[in-house]
Image (spheres, rainbow, N blue to C red):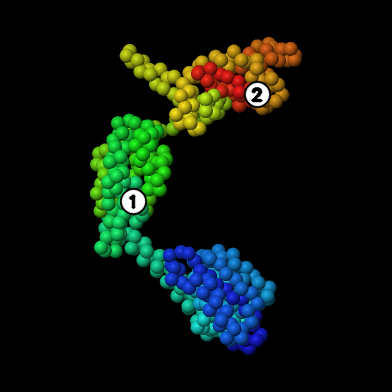
Amino acid sequence: MEETESIKYCLYARKSSEQDERQAMSIDSQLKEMADLALAKGLEVVKVKQESHSAKMSAQRPVFMEMLQEIRDEEYNGILTWAPDRLSRNAGDLGSLVDLMDAKKLAHIKTHSQEFGNNPNEKFLLMILCSQAKLENDNRAINVKRGIRAKCEMGWRPCMPPLGYFTRASTGKERDVIIDQERAPYIVKMFEMSASGKSGRHIRQWLEDNNVKTRGDKSIPLSMIYRMLGSTFYYGEFEYPKNSGKWYQGNHSPLITKELFDKVQIQLKVPAKPKWGSKEFPYKQFLKCYKCGSSIVGEQKVRNYKNGNTKIFTYYHCSRQVDRNCKEPYAKESDIADQLSSMCNELITDIRAVELNLRKAIDKFARMMAITHTDQDQKTMIGAYIKYVLKNGTTYEKTRLIRNLDIKLALHERKLIKI
């Protein structure tokens, strides 16, 4: 090694919060130990750097990359660190260090118990030690996966069980999954209600009425209810990892039967999405609920008659996003169209303000109907077009018209009200 007086050091400390570094010395301890070493050895430390970041992947540590650049810029030519694995656990960052040594930019690396100068033997030793750290990393990941797989094969899902179960420490290394006697009866009833056709919102209200809450003492949200209704854990099986296709038989007591679970899945099954444009609701983003301010959504109902005929009706109702107990009644789409037609002269006040495609459609309609373009006839032309589209237009034409209307309306007791 060259004279230490000619070397300026950067003290670098690193610790990751990941599982594989829980036993590593803390950053504060690294800084103290290496500062004491520098003082004892008379090393000149010109900069101190620290970061909490994993060294598994190359070029992912911003402070480390900054240090490499400062070495290239010749701000210092030595590194002081606790151990070689603080610098690198991957081939990419190790290669960057060796390249700097080959370029005579990095003259010396000093650790608590070793030192590496710019000579073949010490560089080779550095590469072996950092490669060993990478090997330990890789083996640890393999062992963790093997341990998780073995745990699954024993029937223990390696994560928190769903609501309705608790975990408790057993006499061995594994934890027991036991039934939550307080919540479990409500979970079973929840599946039975869903199998009988009750909606998720109905179940949520029932759970709230019975003061059934999460482990964090919060109301159970609708999204969590649907996740629970789709969890195979309740009848005794689980998939791990999720969407892997690897299924295991659980070593816990099931709350429900497989038959009940399958009935629930049939009830929850969402029908295939219809072809684009075949089922659109042109007024759903245009109208608001007068009572609570929520948006209005559309819904189709199929009515079967005794003579075998069926008829589809389209209704609009409050989405209940603001107030899920809102009592605003449903309104027929045909009634909404009739009311808009009666207001046709107020819906578009200036044809120049609407989008180009709609202007062209109105002009084409005017030519067909022999309506002139004078200011006096403009309102008549627009009103006639609106009535035509509301009665005979396609879903696309209705949607295009609605998004260009000037007026803001709310639905109240099946009537349109200006807001």
Q: Which residue corresponds to the image point at 32% horizontal and 37% vertical from the top-left?
A: 190
Q: Is residue 313 visible?
A: yes
The amino acid beneath tag 1 is Pro
Query: Mark 2 sits on what residue?
Result: 406
In the displayed structure, does residue 67 sit left or right of residue 292?
Answer: right
The furthest residue to the top:
370
Q: Nearer the viewer, residue 181 or 93?
A: 181
Residue 30: percent from the left, percent from the top? 52, 75
Query: Mark 1 sits on what residue?
Result: 161
Residue 156: percent from the left, percent from the top? 29, 56
Q: Secondary structure at mark 1?
A: loop
The amino acid beneath tag 2 is Asp
Question: Looking at the figure, which quarter contains the C terminus?
Answer: top right
Please tell me which of labels 1 and 2 falls first in the chain: 1
Q: In the image, which disc is placed on residue 346?
A: none
Q: Which residue corresponds to the image point at 74% horizontal and 12% vertical from the top-left?
A: 376
Residue 25: percent from the left, percent from the top? 48, 73
In front: label 1 or label 2? 1
Q: Are marks 1 and 2 in contact (CB under 8 Å)?
A: no
Q: Is residue 91 visible?
A: no
Residue 11: percent from the left, percent from the top? 59, 76
Q: Which residue corresponds to the image point at 63% horizontal and 25% vertical from the top-left?
A: 404
